[in-house]
Image (cartoon, grey):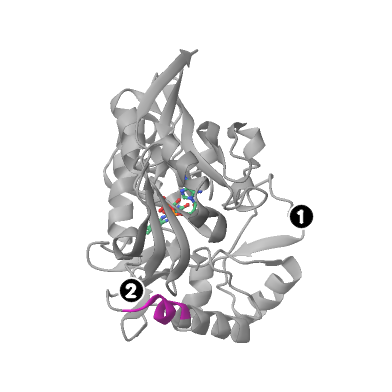
Amino acid sequence: MTQIQENVSLQEYNTFHVDVKARFFVDIKEEQDILDLISTDVFTQYPHLILGGGANILFTKDYEGIVIKVSLMGKESIGEYNDALYVKVGAGEDRHETMMRSLEKGYAGGENLVLIPGQVGSAPVGNIWAYGKEAKDIIHQVEGIDLQTWETKVLSNEDCHFAYRDSIFKHELKGRFLITHVVFVFQKITDEYIVDIHYADIQKAIADQGKDPLKITPSELANIIIAIREQKLPDRTKVGTAWSFFKNPIVTKEQYEKLLQKYPEMKWNEIQHPASSIQHSTLVKLSAWQLIDLIGYKWKSKGPVGTYVNHALVLINEWWASGQDVMNFAQEIQKKVLEQFDVILEPEVIVI
Ligand SMILES: Cc1cc2nc3c(=O)[nH]c(=O)nc-3n(C[C@H](O)[C@H](O)[C@H](O)COP(=O)(O)OP(=O)(O)OC[C@H]3O[C@@H](n4cnc5c(N)ncnc54)[C@H](O)[C@@H]3O)c2cc1C
């Protein structure tokens, strides 16, 4: 049985690097550890938080419960049919490495999702998204343990109810389903495989490198995206961050048109996810970073907290800020955006 530790610092377990403590902390390395844990008194008496890489969480105070750090490792090919390779990966594995390894082995699908910090187990939770691809595009099934019923369950891609940055794990199964493995489906790299290069940043990088867009391989695309992200993202060895702090807000077309009269440069995006319940014709998505730019908060700092020079949506912690300092700064941005545009910015990051 893995040991339940007490009063453990979470500083190395969250990418904001805030120094809070967990009342109890357990590191899950085997499935049996989960079953052992849920039969303890501590588990029944205290709330719990499942933790992956801590890249999407802001701790504003000590956690007065059990932090369950998921460190289930292992990768195994479980079948190949018609050029599709099914790979079962432990929830504690690094996601970026998993995507890169499949490319090295000659299988594609994860090339647009490289360099997104975090573990495999959280990919289905937030249906991670980047450069036009979502985790749902390469997830075949999700395996885990229901912490309430103690049952081991397998959910198909459809069962996960994936939508924009959303899934069943943020609703019916929130906090209660510990993902132990994800089965990815990767495609064998053949001449017929089509890479998704429609994003403007990618197209520009291809043009700058003088490459033929029709001949870009999945590995080349991954390298292009790595270079773009390295240039855009803060250096995580120097500052704390969880990248996009707020979701892009959704407003009515009417409200957007009103805003447009005052701010002709106001950008909007179509709502791209048919899986969401949003009515496409009447609603549009604004760019949160642009709203933050327009309130004058690009590359603005308040003590040790600020917005990143290359991206206003990225809040950074220059090491010594507390989670509450970060949250106060975020709330200041929310207030100013509401006052200026009558738009509510909701955090993308989970605030605890
Ligand atoms: C620099 C940077 C860039 C980023 N860029 C992107 C991006 O381009 N696209 C994007 O989508 N996100 C991005 N993110 C956000 C973040 O990487 C993702 O949200 C990622 O999925 C978080 O992974 P994690 O393992 O750290 O999860 P955590 O932050 O530890 O947890 C996230 C949620 O998943 C739950 N969870 C974690 N593991 C499990 C499990 N095994 N079983 C059940 N529940 C679990 C947690 O309880 C929590 O609710 C970025 C973050 C950073 C720091």
Query: On screen, 53 above or below 247?
Result: above
Q: Whole-percent x and y of residue 217?
A: 34, 30
Q: Is residue 321 above or below residue 105?
A: below
- Tell me the kind of residue under disc 1: Gln
User: Residue 33 placed where, x, y %?
Assistant: 42, 40
- Given the image, on which type of amino acid does mark 2 rest? Asn
SS for dot 2 = strand
Region rendered in magenta: 321-327
The image position of residue 347, as x and y in percent, is 54, 68
Mark 2, residue position: 317
Q: Badge 1 is on which residue?
A: 279
x 42%, y 72%: residue: 62
Q: Is residue 324 magenta?
A: yes
Q: Quadrant of residue 110?
A: top left
Q: Secondary structure at mark 1?
A: loop
Along the line of sight, the residue nearer the viewer: 40 or 95: 40
Residue 202, percent from left and from top:
38, 47
Q: Toward which corner of the image does residue 6 lie, by quadrant?
A: bottom left
- Measuring 65% from the left and 54% from the top, which residue is drawn there? 271
User: Ligand 1 within 8 A of label 2's CB?
Assistant: no
Is 15 part of what is drawn in magenta? no
In the rendered image, the residue lying farthest to the left is 238
Left or right of 119, for residue 128: right
Q: Earlier in the sequence, mark 1 or mark 2?
A: 1
Q: Residue furthest front?
A: 41
Please tell me whether the stretch drawn in magenta is mainly helix, strand or loop.
Answer: helix
Rendered image: mark on residue 75:
none
Q: Disc 1 or disc 2, which is closer to the eye?
A: 2
Residue drawn at the location 60% of the way across and 85% of the way down: 340
CA separation in Å, label 1 and label 2: 37 Å
Residue 13 versus residue 245 in the image, above or below = above
Who's the residue at 41% across and 60% down the image? 24
